[in-house]
Structures are given as structure tokens and as C-alpha cells.
């Protein structure tokens, strides 16, 4: 009698649905996955050690390269951590503009996510629609700083530039367009029977499991845990903004999709409030010419589109470089859920599950 045994399958790092250079070693029983072992590190660039070898204000551009889909948020958390070390605050106008930038970045990230996630599962139309709207935000950022991918547009103590004349009106026009387009995405996917079959009940993770693993962002809120750094520990101008934190109930791939879809609407709401309440005044505060914080350490986190991104920085009080620099990336922490999510599912579900976590390997490997 023939003996049946499990076999090993390599998924990635070249697979387009691996969202970068993620390699999964899958132990298979037929088409059912018994075990998944993620292999990471193929995009490691020693960002933390590079930051320790340069003055504080010369590493802002490196932060763009961590999560290269949520650039402004990575920069924001970094400069805010240094401001805490120095004991300074950015002016109120800069705080409002930073809030607006963060939410535009959230929409930018979620557009990339919904487009690629849809394409992975077989919904090509939404990919084309999402990239159409993405171009509008990229055009706005290009008008502000001249760049479309890596912006280097936060500074310790504020911002390098004020927004151009009339730029805020263009952002409001974008918000009006985006409000209609979110309804289009929902029409394409939310009640689509193929989408429901591919996402409902796939990769269920309970609230208790999500907390135990250390998830944050939409994967945590999709499991029904209403944790959001913007509400729990407000920064920038978020304590002035009225918005809701969407949460799921089932904790599956479909709920994680619904949470991000609602985050589009909440981000539009915050951007409009930031523009309407935008105060006059300077965009950069009083910052010492030589950035040399007193000896000490700090940690600052913000709610990036993928979850909590935080920076731990130690200053020895003698150098203009960080003594120790450590990143807490949401993609790396959220990726820990993948082996648990994948187990017992089919190979075809792997692409849906990786997409539902929304990882960027630049942030995972650093």
C-alpha cells in the first residue's frame, strides 16, 4: 500500500502576491497547508545602524524607505521622537498640516492595498480604479515637495515648507472625488459573491489571539479591538479631530477589508477638519542649530496605515548621533500572525491572507 506524506512548497520570494520578497515555506497535505514558516531578511538594509552613524536630522530620508507606501507617517513618528528628546513642540499650523499629511498617506496606502489585494484575488477592475485615485494624491504631494515616492518632508520642530497657495482647495476637491470613489469600490466588492467566497471565514483571528500576538492597526481592529494610537495617545492635532475608529466582529479577511474601507471615509473626514481649522502662523519652531539632546531615551509611536509604528531612541548627551536607534514596525509585528492564519487553508487562500495583513517588506526587514 502506498504511503502518503506531506510535501514542502516554496511560496515566494519572486511570487507577485508576496508583496515584496517574503518567502513562505509551506508544509502541504495535498492542497491544505499544515504549517507555514515565513523567511524574512532578504530586504535588510541595516537602517537602524545607519541611523546611529549619522546626525539625528540626516536620517529623516531613511524613514521613507521603511514603509515605502506610507512615507509621511514613518517620517512623522521619527521627528516626533526626537522632538520629545529635545523637549520641543512643532507650531500649531505644522501640527495640523502633519495631521493632514498622515491621513492623505493613509488613503494613499489603502489605495495601494485595495488595488493589489483585489488583483491578488482576481478583481482587476478595482486595481485600475485605485491607481487612478492614487495619482491624484501623488500629484498633490509632488506639488508640495517635488517628490512622489520618498518625500523627506518632515523636519525636527515642524516642516521645511508651508503648503502652496491654493493647495488646500485642491485637497478638498480630492476629498470630494474620493468620497464618491469609495462608494464605487464598495459597489464592486462588498456584496460581490466571488469576493465574499474568497474572504469570508478566511483567516479568522479572535480578539484575544490578536492581542496576544501583538497585532496593531486594521488586523487588530478587524478582530474587534478598538485600539488606535490617534485616540489612545493623541499626537499632532488629532485631539482636535472628530472621527470614529471602525472595528470588525468576525476577525476574518472580509472584516479587515471592511475596516480599511471605512478608514477611507474617516480619513477624508479628518482631512476636511484639518483644512477648515488650519491656523495661521509659523511652520517650524525654535530648534537648536546643533541637534544634541541631553542624555536620555524616548519612545514615540503613531498610528500608521498598517498599525503602530514607533521609534525608540537613546541619546548619550555627548554625540549628535543617536546612541541607540530601534524601530517598532507594524508590518513585522503583524506578520507574526501569518502562520496561525494560514494553517488549515488552501494554497489559493495564501494570497488573500498576506494581502489582508498588508505588509511591506522594507519595514519588516529594515
Image (tube, rainbow, N blue to C red):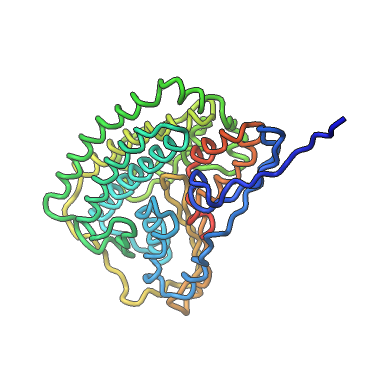
Say if 229 sits above or below 32 in the image: below
Residue at 59% over, 32% down: 205
Give 23 or 241, whichever is nearer the viewer.
23
Residue at the right extreme, as displayed: 1
Give 41 or 279, whichever is nearer the viewer.
41
Q: Is residue 46 left or right of residue 208?
A: left
Say if 235 sits above or below 113 in the image: below
* Visible residue check, residue 198: yes
Residue at 38% over, 71% down: 58
- Residue 284: image location, x then y, percent: 25, 63
Residue at 47% over, 33% down: 121
- Residue 99: image location, x then y, percent: 30, 48
Q: Quadrant of residue 293?
A: bottom left
Q: Is residue 50 left or right of residue 102?
A: right
Q: Quadrant of residue 154?
A: bottom left
Number of numbered discs: 0
Give 238 or 342, whichever is nearer the viewer.
342
User: Which quadrant, please, contains the N terminus?
Assistant: top right
* Visible residue check, residue 154: no
- Residue 153: image location, x then y, percent: 29, 60
Residue at the left extreme, as displayed: 165
- Residue 145: image location, x then y, percent: 24, 60
Q: Quadrant of residue 291?
A: bottom left
Residue at the front extreme, as displayed: 1
Q: Is residue 168 left or right of residue 322?
A: left
Amino acid at each position: 500500500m502506498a504511503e502518503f506524506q506531506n510535501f514542502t512548497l516554496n511560496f515566494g520570494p519572486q511570487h507577485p502576491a508576496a508583496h515584496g520578497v517574503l518567502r513562505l515555506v509551506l508544509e502541504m497535505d495535498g492542497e491544505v497547508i499544515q504549517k507555514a514558516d515565513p523567511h524574512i531578511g532578504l530586504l535588510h538594509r541595516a537602517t537602524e545602524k545607519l541611523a546611529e552613524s549619522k546626525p539625528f536630522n540626516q536620517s529623516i530620508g531613511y524613514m521613507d524607505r521603511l514603509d515605502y507606501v506610507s512615507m509621511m507617517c514613518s517620517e512623522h513618528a521619527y521627528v516626533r521622537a526626537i522632538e520629545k528628546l529635545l523637549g520641543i513642540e512643532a507650531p500649531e499650523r505644522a501640527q495640523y498640516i502633519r495631521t493632514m499629511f498622515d491621513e492623505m498617506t493613509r488613503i494613499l496606502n489603502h489605495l495601494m492595498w485595495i488595488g493589489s489585494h483585489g488583483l491578488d484575488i482576481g478583481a482587476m477592475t478595482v486595481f485600475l480604479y485605485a491607481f487612478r485615485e492614487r495619482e491624484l494624491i501623488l500629484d498633490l504631494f509632488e506639488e508640495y515637495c517635488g517628490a512622489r515616492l520618498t518625500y523627506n518632508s518632515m523636519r525636527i520642530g515642524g516642516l521645511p515648507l508651508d503648503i502652496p497657495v491654493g493647495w488646500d482647495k485642491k485637497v478638498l476637491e480630492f476629498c470630494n472625488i474620493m468620497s464618491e470613489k469609495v462608494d464605487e469600490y464598495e459597489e464592486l466588492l462588498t456584496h460581490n459573491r466571488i469576493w465574499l467566497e474568497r474572504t469570508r471565514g478566511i483567516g479568522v483571528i479572535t480578539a484575544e489571539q490578536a492581542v496576544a500576538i501583538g497585532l496593531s492597526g486594521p488586523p487588530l481592529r478587524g478582530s474587534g479591538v478598538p485600539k488606535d494610537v490617534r485616540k489612545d495617545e493623541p499626537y499632532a492635532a488629532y485631539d482636535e479631530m472628530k472621527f470614529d475608529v471602525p472595528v470588525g466582529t468576525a476577525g476574518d479577511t472580509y472584516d479587515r477589508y471592511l475596516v480599511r474601507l471605512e478608514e477611507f471615509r474617516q480619513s477624508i473626514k479628518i482631512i476636511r477638519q484639518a483644512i477648515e481649522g488650519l491656523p495661521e502662523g509659523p511652520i517650524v519652531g525654535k530648534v537648536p542649530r546643533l541637534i544634541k539632546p541631553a542624555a536620555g531615551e524616548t519612545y514615540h509611536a503613531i498610528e500608521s496605515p498598517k498599525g503602530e509604528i514607533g521609534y525608540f531612541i537613546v541619546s548619550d548627551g555627548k554625540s549628535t548621533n543617536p546612541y541607540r536607534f530601534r524601530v517598532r514596525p507594524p508590518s513585522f509585528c503583524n506578520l507574526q500572525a501569518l502562520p496561525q492564519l494560514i494553517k488549515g487553508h488552501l494554497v489559493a487562500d495564501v494570497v488573500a491572507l498576506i494581502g489582508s495583513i498588508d505588509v511591506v517588506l522594507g519595514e519588516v526587514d529594515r
